[in-house]
Image (cartoon, rainbow, N blue to C red):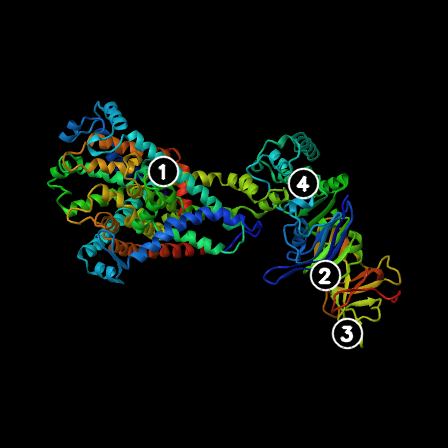
Amino acid sequence: MRTKRVVFRSLWLPYLLIAPQIAITAIFFLWPAGQAIYQSFLRQDAFGLRTEFVGLENFARLVNDPLYLKSFTTTLVFSALVAGISMGVALLLAVMADRVLRSALFYRTLLIWPYAVAPAVAGVLWFFLFNPTIGIAAYFLARLGYEWNHYASGTDAMALIVIAAAWRQVSYNFLFFLAGLQAIPGSLTEAAAMDAAGPFKRFWTIQLPLLSPTVFFLLVVNLVYAFFDTFGIVHATTRGGPGNDTAILVFEVWRDAFEGLDLGFSAAQSVVLMAIVIALTAIQFRYIERRVEY
Amino acid sequence: MVENRPLTNIVTHGVLILGAAVFVLPIWIAFVASTHTGREVNRGLTLWPGDQFIANYTTALTEGVATAGAPPLALMLFNSTVMALAIAVGKITISLLSAFAIVYFRFPFRVLAFWTIFVTLMLPVEVRILPTFEVVAGLGLLNSYAGLSIPLIASATATFLFRQFFMTVPDELTEAARIDGAGPLRFFRDILVPLSRTNLAALFVILFIYGWNQYLWPLLVTTDESYYTIVMGIQRMLATSDQLPEWHLIMATAILAMIPPVLVIVLMQRLFVRGLVEVEK
Amino acid sequence: MTAITLRNVSKTYPGGVEAIKGVSLDIGDGEFLVLVGPSGCGKSTLLRMIAGLETITAGEISIGERVVNNLEPAERDIAMVFQNYALYPHMSVRQNLEYGLKNRRMARDEIARRVEKAAGILGIAELLARKPRQLSGGQRQRVAMGRAIVREPAAFLFDEPLSNLDAKLRVQMRAEIRHLQRSLGTTSVYVTHDQLEAMTLADRIVVLNGGVVEQVGTPMEVYERPASLFVASFIGSPAMNLVPLQQARERAAIAGLVNGSVPSGLSTDAVLGVRPEDMTVGENGAGADAVRFAFTVTAVEAVGAESYVHGNLQGGAGDIAVRMPGYHRLEPGTVLSAVTAPEKLHFFAGASGQRVDRAGAAQ
């Protein structure tokens, strides 16, 4: 790894400078992560009095636990929907905003601020909007003949958390898509226009292919977001219900640790989540490396 | 735009305005709800603000939602501000220092230190919930501002951002400073930090929002209501099983919870966008 | 006042690359010494070793009375002007000038006095409140010099300070640097790859090649008596004609030589050098001992006041250029003769490239 050509010489100063970061990392990141792995091989009784080493038993329980497997599927469906919807909407808006360059900044201002809204708060907002008795969205759905009830219907509850999660993430995706589109040289679209390609054709043949690195990058970021940052939405609104239909993996870990007090089982889930993050981060960094080459 | 046809223009603006409207709608409804009495809200469907704005917000700020056991919003707002500022300032400080060490010194274990910091990227709170809670509890940091902020201030992204920026600072500046008699700390203070100003500001915007919006962490480390943050406290108001939620106050809370970060983003849009793009590089 | 001494100074990089191979130099008090050479010859490395920005692998550098090998740059009492100026972008011009003095805890009024004085000398007094980005290239250059001057150091070190300026400004700043150094009388070491800059600025020139000193001398010494083939090819514009000798009847010979002879004792792999400006075309005014080459014209370059005639020496490989005053139209293929005096011929041994001085007056 590179340093500067020009460096300072000191035997102790660099250690002093880096010590706070390393200390916090070691105490609050590495040690707990190690503990999680360690605990995933243990079983504790409910009072924490007896602990025994059980090898891979916790993982075996995971694989055979229908609730956990369901949570896995729920998470996949949820993540795919959030990523797909938020990216799709964002791309549409970004393409439109890119077409009206002069007002792009104006629309950007209108569209970016939901990113500042905490996921939990976003969840509460939509929870209210869709409230079956007093929510305005539920009211209009009822006028259209659909009886919305996220307390009773798993599908409605899933739709609710997807909307809340995607609503907030559109801002983020929009920013990156708009930046990506504006980085495409105008001469390219102009050349395509002279080649008699209409706006739609230009989008599919010029803009989208050139945006593909952004698309890929955002896909990873959105998946990470949907996997890990949406705990607040679920916890503040549906609480995993009804009938575990919205219990995503992170929520499941939390519940098993703090409500179920099943430490080994929760730790095993943490280890699985860790593997997922590591995989996603690795993909992201491989991609960044490639981008550096160009 | 290549074409200049009125029809496409109208469609384009139409889509954008519709999009913006969908984005604003939830906020508008929330605001409207926060200006009516609880009974009016529970009757359903109001689209225009009522006259309870001052009453509701005063109640929320000074008394909180009593039925849900949440403290007054003023206290939660204060806690959120302390936490967000501590996280932003803390992350920036320790990341600046460690990036400086990694870029401007060669020392044994330098690469190891770099990878140690890198690993934090792969270990978000969500994957180590319980053991981290145990560490914080063991250190006696539950229900404290230190417990709310310190465990979150390790930052690989901020360190990488500064490292990347430092790599672009011309070596000649360092050499000129050395000839001018500046040692490493003086160079850091007089040259490097002032040169990083824009990056610092951009990062501050991002990290303030990050800190403000924390949910799981305050949920874990606070049991004492007087340390609740507003983003995390809002769920306590919903969790009333025996009676109807006080929606007018909850919506006032939601509005208050989003005002600071939204203001930061809108007022510092340029810095925010820059920060976001830089961090993700 | 300050002399700088280098004794067998070497620099080997961790990868094993030898950048400087045993250089010894004595730089006199108040002298303006120019290190010149192609890129990669080690001239900047050598300067940076004097500055303390590069470590010294072997040998000894003294500034004044002190051996400075292990001193920090700030402790060496030198000031440096960088190629890209290295002005602190967030500081005003005044702050840039003051920074080194403040770090040395100099009294405020002394700092102010020095800054005013330097600004006066350089004509940047009205720029003191500006930031570097609000300055033109030439102004930045002046501020960079000002930062060196306020320090009143024992020596100035210049690392290609003019190479970022346009041609016209470069000539002007060259004259200013020369004037400034003379009036301050501060020992100066100046690195450049531009031999014209070296010739016009230097008291003495050091020609470096591959980390080795090829020649040390005044500009005229280096020009008139290049010590090696490398120096001959590097100093002078247009470059010296270099023609390999040929073998003819057991002796070294010169292609196209009409009148004159090759000194005895030269091996056949030696090289003849003669500057274009030391030759004339035609026969007029040449004495009996004049050396004459016959050559076939291939091209004529007119540069205004003079023309350079390019051609092939007759009877062998070898291209030469000859300077002619004024403008001439010559058809390619014309056969001409180039005339020069015997003492204008330089010979270099083939294997070592070292200059071979003609023993006695052998003609």
Foreground: disc 4 or disc 1: 1
Three-letter amino acid code of the residue under disc 3: Gln
Q: Residues within 10 Å of mark 1 (few under 14, many from 20)?
A: some
Q: CA distance from mark 4 to mark 3?
A: 56 Å
| Quarter that holds the C terminus of chain A | bottom left
| x then y, percent, for residue A155 | 16, 47
* Mark 2 vs 4, N-terminal side: 4
Q: Chain of mark 4?
A: C
The residue to which callout 4 is attached is C148
- Do discs 4 and 3 share a chain? yes
Three-letter amino acid code of the residue under disc 4: Ala
| x then y, percent, for residue C211 | 68, 59
* Mark 4 vs 3, N-terminal side: 4
| x then y, percent, for residue B197 | 48, 38
Q: CA distance from mark 2 to mark 4?
A: 33 Å
The residue to which callout 1 is attached is B145
Q: CA distance from mark 2 to mark 1?
A: 72 Å
The residue to which callout 2 is attached is C230
Nearer-the-camera pick, A156 or A231:
A231
